Image: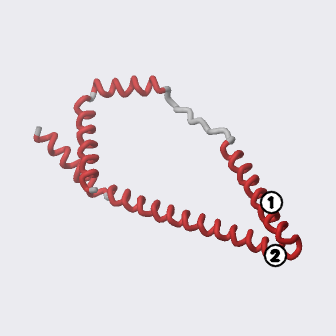
Amino acid sequence: MPILSGLVRAASTAYALSGLGETIRASAGRIALASLCATVTAICAIAAMTCAIFALWIFALPYVGPVGAPLLAAGVLVIISIALLAVARSVLRRPRRRSHPSVAPELMIAEATRLLREHKGAVLLAALVAGLIAGNDRRDR
């Protein structure tokens, strides 16, 4: 058992020194910031579209009257909506790329079973280290 505890201690020390936890935290921060920027951008785009429709309404009011100006603005919105629906439909109808594994799943399972039978100690040690790392990560939160 002293060898096992030494290996676990060495693995956990290597994980702590690798800085993987900090990398994950930094990535999460960048993703949150990018999401915030995308949300603000979407709100600004909606506001700009609204201003453009109101400007069209005000511009068309003297030419088409108080009934025609809202109808013209509504028509522009319908055209924009149809265009966006067409884009969404084309995106959803694109054929998906299928990833073909280089090895059949049955062969991968057979190989994993063989490795488990031949190297039980190494597999159990790897599972133990993975559990320690996962447990340590949850405790920090």
**Residue 137 placement (x, y as % from top left):** 28, 52
Toward the front, the furthest residue is 66
The image shows residue 42 at horizontal and vertical percentages of 60, 64
Quarter in which the N terminus is drawn? top left
| Image quarter hosting the C terminus | bottom left
Mark 1 to mark 2 CA distance (whole Å): 15 Å
Which residue type carries mark 1?
Answer: Gly
Quarter of image, res 112: top left
Find residue 75 and report its horizontal and vertical position in percent: 80, 60
The residue at 36%/59% (across/down) is: 25
Left or right position of 36 against 56: left
Q: Camera-side residue: 67 or 83?
A: 67
Instruction: In the rendered view, tell whether residue 43 sits above or below residue 138.
Output: below
Look at the picture and state if 57 lies above or below 98. Answer: below
Question: Circle 2 is placed at which residue position?
Answer: 59
Between 136 and 81, which is closer to the camera in this rendering? 81
User: Mark 2: which amino acid?
Assistant: Phe
Residue 33 numbered tag: none
Q: Looking at the rendering, which quadrant does residue 119 occupy?
A: top left
